[in-house]
Amino acid sequence: MRVSRGAVRAALAIVALAALPFAIGDFWAYQLGLFYLYAIAALGVGVCWGRTGFLPLGQGLFFGLAAYGSGLALIAFDGSPWLLVLVPLAAIVPGLLAFALGLLVFRRRGESGPYFSMITLALSLLAYQLANNWESVTGGFNGLKGIPGLPGLDSYTAAYDVAATALAGSALMVAWLYRAPLGVLWSALALNERRVVLFGFDTNRLKAVAFGVSGLLAGIGGALYAPQQGLVTPQLCGFALSADLVIWAAVGGRARLLGPALGAIAIGVLASELRDRFPYWEIALAIVFILVVLFFPEGLAGMFTPIARRFRRPVPSPAPIAAPARPEVAQPSRLEIDGVDVKVGEVTILDRLTLALDRSAIHCVIGPNGAGKTSTFNVLTGELPVQAGAVRFDGYALERLPAHRIARLGIGRKFQIPSVFPQLAIADHLAIALWSARARPLELLKPSLRRWSTPLLDALRERYPFLRHDARPAAALSHGERQILELAMALLGEPRLLLLDEPCAGLSPQETAAVIDVIRWASARRRATIVVIEHDMALVRHLAEHVFVLHNGRLLAEGSVAAIQADPAVQAIYVGAEK
Amino acid sequence: MGSVFVAQALNALFGIAALAIVALGLAVTLGLLGVLNLAHGEVVMIGAYCAYVVQAQGLPYVAAIPLAIAVCAVLGWTVERWLVRPLYQRPFDTLIVTWGLSLLLRKCAEAMFGLGYKSLNEPVSGTLEVLGATYPRYRLLLVLVAVVVLTALVFWYRTSRTGTRIQAMVGNPELASAMGIPVSRYASATFVAGTCLAGLAGVLIAPLVPVQPFMGLDHILMSFFVLVVGGLGSVAGLVTGSTVIGGANSVVSALSDSTGGYFCVLALAILFLWLKPRGLHAR
């Protein structure tokens, strides 16, 4: 029988964890048990801050809520089998609350910075006040006292084992999520949220899920804290624990799976040794935190990376799985832009722009700088609100849909400046593009989706061998390679309408020829409608079957390349003759 | 009946003025530099402890103002130079670093003064009769000072050469730099101005609140929500924000309790995030 090395390592770790209390004695087993519970909550800070890129400053709220919930349940139902339901429920409810709060706060796009952090901070202070004032339930300032232990698990060693099992289980859960598409999307949206939206993912919901998971992890810690400590006080909900969790995650290494847990345990042990002997311990810790943020964002876990890398052997990539096929484009899409006005402040960007296209062909959009070409794309992808007019795509009113829904209708886009995820590997980029139109929400939990492949992907890898360097990060690619990578991502979603914004900008003549080749090839193969913004007339002549000329936010002319070049109005704006 | 109404109106006016003067420093650093200084509340706390030291030494209360400004200027300069300046391109990290700074300052205050509450005497005691209502003189003085400081600041910003240069820096730092404006020096000075204003606010409110190491938390949250509701970059925004947040807080707190007031402020902040993410007075 073959056993994977990961399983062997996990088994060894579990044996070591279980044997530890015999080596260190009851006192330390008790202390470590507590730090493990904090470590579980710290894992959640890692999910939010290290992976998904938003900082929760009030995780104590969820820890405290769960601790009060399970404490009250244990007091009311001591020894009853109902506890098998109620204690887990005490952990799950904070997770659901965090998810709901995430949906509320992230509802407006882009609100993951300071706003989110401040609201979570305020919420935890509010919870602290509530816990203090609502004496009939929470016991007020002195807290809930005399909480019985979990039935049958009352000794120090048993409490340690419960905490260690919960920590191991939580770490496995987070490891699973990081391996699943969901974890890849979390990393991706932390690097470039707009790009993830334009692949058709509801990033607000993804962030809310991350926050919900962190709430659940804090909840698991809190629900086990009550029986372990026998006492729950308002301080748990408040600022101090929330702050500690962030410090632990940072010092331990927020971006790594186990970093936050490592930080919680290491600092916990140090604190219990030093707090009484060294009066300025907390001041020193705050300084260490600032230094870590400034100079060592990798934290303690980062110090082990070079060692770990030395022992790592290359893993053969697993066999690919065929991704579900996208429906063939039976009938060309119909796109109508009808009298669209766009104003930003006082400036008119689009001025009753009207144009329609319904052929599966390569269309080019030309026009001088400021004509509204890229803005037109932004309107089509739902990123620029429209003041008047309508945009219809195969019967859908695009001006009323959010950007991720529009992308799901089959509108793909490539930006003028290649928009990739610098720290993510090439394989992750390609996988995200494949998931964009194909993965159902629950499938995002299945790690096997990372092995998806399609005939188009094989063909692209055939043409561009660098796409086979699965583990190479996008940051290591040249400008030309990034252009190709983003183009490949846009193509892999197999959109019905593909918007390309100067796909050849900054490329050498050879690279340009290659890109043109791919665009034509994709157009013939998929029968998709392609719209290209281009400045280079030589390229337009080469590529376009139909040309739109934009000027001052309006459609000036349209037709074949020859017809456009003969048009006196077009000549006038390009040569600068009288208007 | 009339005197009760006047007293309530004065209370509301005082609440708004106190909130506006506390939020002013944050408005300067966030509105002009785009730096959310999470240690803002702790700078207010330092100002308040300066007032405590001055009063404990038996010195005249006014001496707290130069002391607080000096301490906060040194602190502001140091923080800008060593923590904020390396991170102007990484606003999210600024948030985290200043949050760490807030922990540090709080722990330092705890080490120096202990966790206990300090209460200060009002430097101007007694009451004054206003339209039939008697009202504490010190609170009226605070309203007056807030109005004077705000007006003077706006006047200076709009008319002075330095004010114009700062406006240029805010509008387009690269162009301003190309025009020969020493942008990094002005940014540093602006940050220092923000911390000094926070310290001054601390001195002003110290006699009216319990002075303790954790007092900054409430101030940073309230100040931030004021700016969220009012919008960044204008005094009108600061005043409307203070009116909405201070008004809602005091009305709901009076009707239920402080937890209710707090909850109401938080709900307002989330509501504004949805409906008016750039505040009532967007720049």
Image (cartoon, coloured by chain):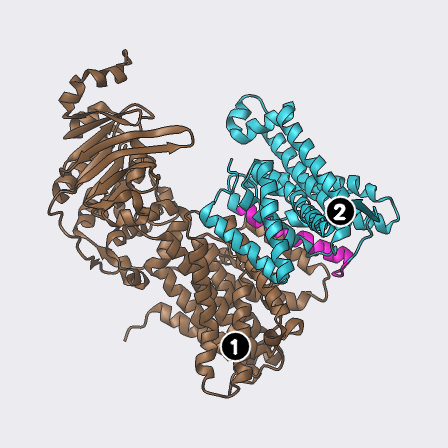
Chain colours: A brown, B cyan
Q: Is residue A1 above or below residue B276?
A: below
Residue interval drawn in magenta? B93-117
**How far is disc 2 from disc 1 in space, using C-alphas?**
47 Å
Q: Which amino acid does label 1 sit on?
A: Ser
Where disc 1 sits, the SS reads helix
Is B220 on the left or on the right of A506, as rendered? Answer: right
**Occupied quadrant, residue B32:** top right
Q: What residue type is labelled 2?
A: Arg
> Most extreme residue toward the front, as rendered?
B1
**For mark 2, does the 10 Å Cα neighbourhood hold few (<14), some (14 to 19), or many (20 or more) residues?**
many
Q: Mark 1 points at which residue?
A: A70
Which quarter shows the N terminus of chain A?
bottom left
**For mark 1, does the 10 Å Cα neighbourhood hold few (<14), some (14 to 19), or many (20 or more) residues?**
many
Residue A328 in view of the camera: yes
Residue A334 falls within the magenta-colored stretch: no
Q: Position of residue A291 (x, y in %)?
A: 60, 50
| Relative depth, front residue between A332 and A158 | A332
Which quarter shows the C terminus of chain A?
top left
Q: What residue is rendered at 44% in x and 69% in y? A: A170
Magenta region, mostly helix, strand or loop? helix
| Relative depth, front residue between A285 and A223 | A223
Say the numbered circle drawn on residue A213.
none
Q: In this view, does A164 lie above or below A306?
A: below
Q: Where is residue A378 in the image (x, y as percent from the top left)?
A: 32, 38
Q: Name the residue under label 2.
A: B139
Is A107 on the left or on the right of A510, as rendered? Answer: right
| Relative depth, front residue between A566 and B120 | B120
Q: How many labels does the image show?
A: 2
Where disc 2 sits, the SS reads helix
